[in-house]
Amino acid sequence: MVSSTPPEEGQDLEIMTTNDYVNNQLIEIAWEVCNQVGGIYTVIQSKVPSTVQKWGNNYLLLGPYFSNQASTMFELATDYSDPIGQVVKKMNESGYSVYYGTWLIAGHPKVVLFDPNAVMNRIGEFKYSFWEHHNISLPNDNLLDQVVAFGAQVTEFIRLYSKKLKDKKNIITHFHEWMAGTPIPELRKHKLDLKIIFTTHATLLGRYLAMNDPEFYDHLEQYDWEKEATHFNIYASVAIERAAAHGAHMFSTVSEITAKECRYLLGRSPEMILPNGLSIARFEALHELQILHKEFKKNISQFVTGHFFQNYSFDLNKTLYFFTSGRYEYHNKGYDLTLEALARLNWKMKQHNVDATVVMFIVTKSPFKSINSNVLESRAMLDEIGRTCEELNESLSEKLFTYMVNNMSSRLPNLNTLLDDYNAIKLRKNIRVWRKNIMPPIVTHDLEDEEKDSIMNFLKTAGLLNYKEDKVKVVYHPDFVSSSNPLFRMEYYQFVRGCHLGLFPSYYEPWGYTPLECAASGIPSITSDLSGFGDYVKNNIKDSEKNGITVLKRSEKSYDEIAETMANKMFEFVKMNRRERINLRNRTEHASVRFGWRNLGKYYDHAYKNLIIE
């Protein structure tokens, strides 16, 4: 097998040829096919267009069928005459629940979906078979039962389909993550004539350990996987992950950092590193990048006005929007480090009397009861003030025009005399009601348990409570940003494009899409060398900081050193002038093409080529 060290960018790789695409069938299996539940969905979905372009009809995806997701993502096939349709019909006749059709995304790939809930009457049989053949005991658990039922159907499909294609095409099966991995040991037991590659995007045990051990990387060699998996009550899932890793012909992961983790927690070193990419849509003109940034920044500024200006105001033309987002893992995602660095930035800006304001958005899903009534009311009242202003403007414009064309003098009238009395009085009343002598809230929602919320506890301890004199303001938004959200009224990608800087100094991050998404939007970001993406940038992209991606060195550094370095990096950004920030955005967007699937897809092709020639 080949080395797990990823080739340097620009190095020639042995990749697939046109004949290889014609003579081989690629089947990709993931729990996130037509099922948007996590980051793997982005990996698979964004990779599809470039994969279909290469493989054409020789590309097939397998995933679970859940009606709530499939109703908007999946279209049933009408013709079942091809080998895939024939196998699907045969399985349904045998009592399985299988759907064949098209995934409604760019590329329109062929997919086969398996309903795990429809075969739960056989779950005991599936589990016993897994125990008898592979000595893995599976407890009663809803997710685990679904995974096993899905895997049993995938196994049967691949077994039947491989017979259909016998002597016609070679089959490569690519499984992603442990939830799709249960068929691997069973397929090997059947000794089917196909090649299997298994990719773990993050080890299940590693995620748990990193959340609970601040020195996770230093202790990697010392962990007893069975003891730790039992301790976290995830033994069965980890056992499946290990069986998949050891059963595959080729084992891969997304970064060298995760490869090290796999060596000690899964007991096998990956043979291939397969970095994650995005579908990068390049702009034909740089001015379009700036137009979109300005447009979406205006939406964010409307929220900021409603959130803060009831009590006090600041110059929005001198305000920068920073943000962080991701799963709520306080230590793993680097929220602790980000908050500490922000507190230091606030002090630095006040000490140097910097004439600017930073509004920091923390966007992460956390349990809440409802949107804070004061926040919602403030936004609604601001909208009413805006509508009244528009009515006044329309009325004033009409009256001013009439006055000017009917008077011989070119002198302007007293505009107050032209104002509509009703709307003017209404506007003054609304402003008086809207103004309140209360502190702008930190969190936009009523949290279920604020006293135990780590983010809120830090902000209270550090005194980052949105005082008027603070240069750094904080908005903690424990929900998704979407167009249906009454506070922001914009999609997440629009929100990202409207910000100025993304902050993602993760401690544990096998890859990390958020800084990559920033780059694709032309937004500079700060990440860390403990994230797979940061590690890839550090080893492959020269002068990355000049191209809008700052990689903090977290390994072998104290918490205090890292926090101070991050605060200084943010302080340097704050001191940039507008022209410097525009130039940095342009360079960031220009560099993002390196992270598109057209470039990073070569690593997948390299892996498949190695499987074929083994």
Image (cartoon, rainbow, N blue to C red):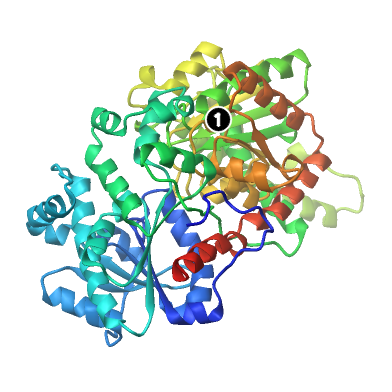
Q: Position of residue 368 (x, y in %)?
A: 35, 31
Q: Position of residue 452 (x, y in %)?
A: 36, 19
Badge 1 crowding class, 10 Å Cα cut-off, few under 14, some 14 to 19, many 20 or more, is: many
In the displayed orientation, state which residue is furthest to the bottom.
81
- Above or below: residue 166 compared with residue 144: below
Q: In the depicted view, which residue is nearer to us: 297 or 409?
A: 297
Q: In the depicted view, which residue is nearer to us: 61 or 339?
A: 61
Q: Position of residue 545 (x, y in %)?
A: 73, 39
Q: Judge from the rendering whether residue 561 lies leftward or rightward of residue 119; answer left or right.
A: right
Number of numbered markers: 1
- Above or below: residue 255 compared with residue 197: above
Residue at point 52% right, 40% down?
257
Q: Judge from the rendering whether residue 333 lies leftward or rightward of residue 193; answer left or right.
A: right
Residue at point 57% right, 35% down?
504
Residue at point 47% right, 70% down?
613
Q: Is residue 176 visible?
A: yes
Q: Which residue is mark 1?
A: 307
- SS of the residue under disc 1: helix
Q: Quadrant of residue 298?
A: top right
Q: Position of residue 355 (x, y in %)?
A: 78, 24
Residue at point 27% right, 70% down?
192
Q: Judge from the rendering whether residue 175 lies leftward or rightward of residue 513; answer left or right.
A: left
Q: Quadrant of the C terminus?
A: bottom left
Q: In the depicted view, which residue is nearer to us: 106 or 138?
A: 138
Q: Is residue 490 visible?
A: no
Q: Amino acid at mark 1?
A: His
Q: In the depicted view, which residue is nearer to us: 30 or 613?
A: 613
Q: Judge from the rendering whether residue 127 lies leftward or rightward of residue 282; answer left or right.
A: left
